[in-house]
Amino acid sequence: MRVSVIGCGYLGAVHASAMAKIGHDVVGIDVDLHKIGTLSQGDAPFFEPGLPELLREGMASGRLRFTGDIAEASGAAVHFIAVGTPQEKDGYAADLTSVNAAVDALLPHLAPGDVVAGKSTVPVGTAVDLAARIEATGATLVWNPEFLREGWAVKDTIEPDRLVVGVPFDPSTGHCSEAGERAADLLREVYHPAVAAETPFIVTDWATAELVKVAANAFLATKISFINAMAEIAEVTGADVTQLADAIGHDVRIGRRFLGAGIGFGGGCLPKDIRAFSARAEELGRGESVTFLREVDAINLRRRERAVQLVVEALGGQVYKKKVTLLGAAFKPYSDDIRDSPALDVAVRLRGLGASVTVTDPAAIDNARRLHPQLAYVEDRDDAIRGADAIVLVTEWDLYRRDLTPPHASRLTSGRVVVDGRNGWDAAAWRAAGWRYYGMGRP
Ligand code: UDX
């Protein structure tokens, strides 16, 4: 099938490559010509495991190309909208400028029977606002949210755990319209390998599809902040939040995943999505339904400050001129994404207190340096640790969490303080090697 993907960021570049991988003829379109140039050479403009291989394979097969010219979308049966919806500069709401611009640019190239599939995360009600313009061309609008995780984006796109398609409903019958049925069938064809593998395929209305995405992210953020709130209680009672998480996680109704207490969540999705959800709920007159998301955000931000406090305490009450090495800059491992990164936030706060901060990361140093040139960056992990008064684990890359052993660290520095911002290390092993170990919500 001929498919166009408008917006070639994290979401769109992966989606376009994955669509080519499963046999479609794909054109990826973006207004950023620099990005188009990079992708056209088969290079990924960001770090995502498996993406470079997929890009090269797609280009070599002749089924994948990238362009800055939206006119090349014509002839595609399905047009995916995968542009960004960042937080507004002066508020919590999502900025829909790119979504509107992409749809307006696409309109002249739509033909009757085409399907426009929104993938961007948008406030509930966006599809209704866009529909008239799209339907005037004879095309059908569906909302098909994306649940990919950075670092696992390729796998999550090719083998999603569920597919959700919001289609137009006929207000007179209350049923999915005929055009909606046809559009859902077309998307079943698009996602044929997942459909053949009996992946749940949920056909619903626009509003539900839009809400599924924000509700999923709100739930995940809440789960993380819940365990971080327990960490705060553990800190004043001597309890260990990691054991608590193990114990409650055995209950299948709760589950252990996303109960990792530490410096909290960041990235381009969870923080902005919960804020946009609050803003939209307010607009809908239902702000009180999601007031708890403000609390989720507040707990999350407090944990960054708590990590800073732990470093200060561990270094005897002040960090001025103390050498502190931060292991990690990305918001999570297997990513070079530093958007709203808790790791960098902790680094910047420590530097603000006068510490001599060194940051290392296997993938995110270039991005971090652009945003925070005032911090010192060292590529090599061991060089970064050498001579440190304190080591702080802020992004749990294997290179740090799994591979850095206490005896090895002891050979690199005479400082004997580790602050484990991700509760990723074995506290007993560090203590046995003579280190003072500080976890988040652990005695
Ligand atoms: C998230 C959703 O998981 C994904 O479904 C959606 O499509 C986009 O947003 P992503 O931003 O890639 O994906 O990151 P995710 O793996 O969810 O992690 C988010 C943040 O939460 C990271 O900063 C991570 O370190 C933190 N986290 C995660 C915790 O602090 N504790 C946990 O137990 C899990």
Image (spheres, rainbow, N blue to C red):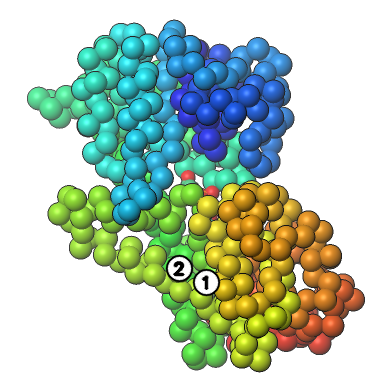
In the image, residue 18 above or below residue 440 = above
| Residue under the image location 24 percent in, 21 percent down | 133
- For this view, does 155 lie left or right of residue 205? right
Q: Quarter holding the C terminus?
A: bottom right
Give x and y (percent) for residue 159.
Answer: 56, 35
Spot occupied by residue 335 in the image (x, y as percentages of width and height):
63, 49
Residue 347 drawn at (x, y percent): 61, 68
Which element is circle 2 on? Answer: helix
Q: Tell me what residue is drawn at x 52 percent, y 86 percent.
A: 235
**How far apart, in angstroms, are the residues tagged by discs 2 and 1?**
7 Å
Task: Point out residue 236 in the picture as x, y percentages from the top left corner.
Answer: 49, 90
Q: Residue at x 69, y 36 (%)?
A: 50
- Residue 332's quadrant in the figure? bottom right
Residue contact between numbered discs 2 and 1, judged by CB atoms under 8 Å: yes
Mark seen at residue 304: 1
Other residues around mark 2 within 10 Å, as few (<14) / some (14–19) / many (≥20): many
Residue 361 seen by the camera:
yes
Q: Identify the residue shown where x is 84% and y is 83%.
A: 414
Residue nearer the viewer, 2 or 34: 34
- Tell me which amino acid carries mark 1: Arg
Above or below, 33 against 49 in this view is above
257 above or below 127? Answer: below
Rendered position, 228 above or below 396: below
Number of numbered discs: 2
Mark linked to residue 391: none
* Residue 300's disc number: 2
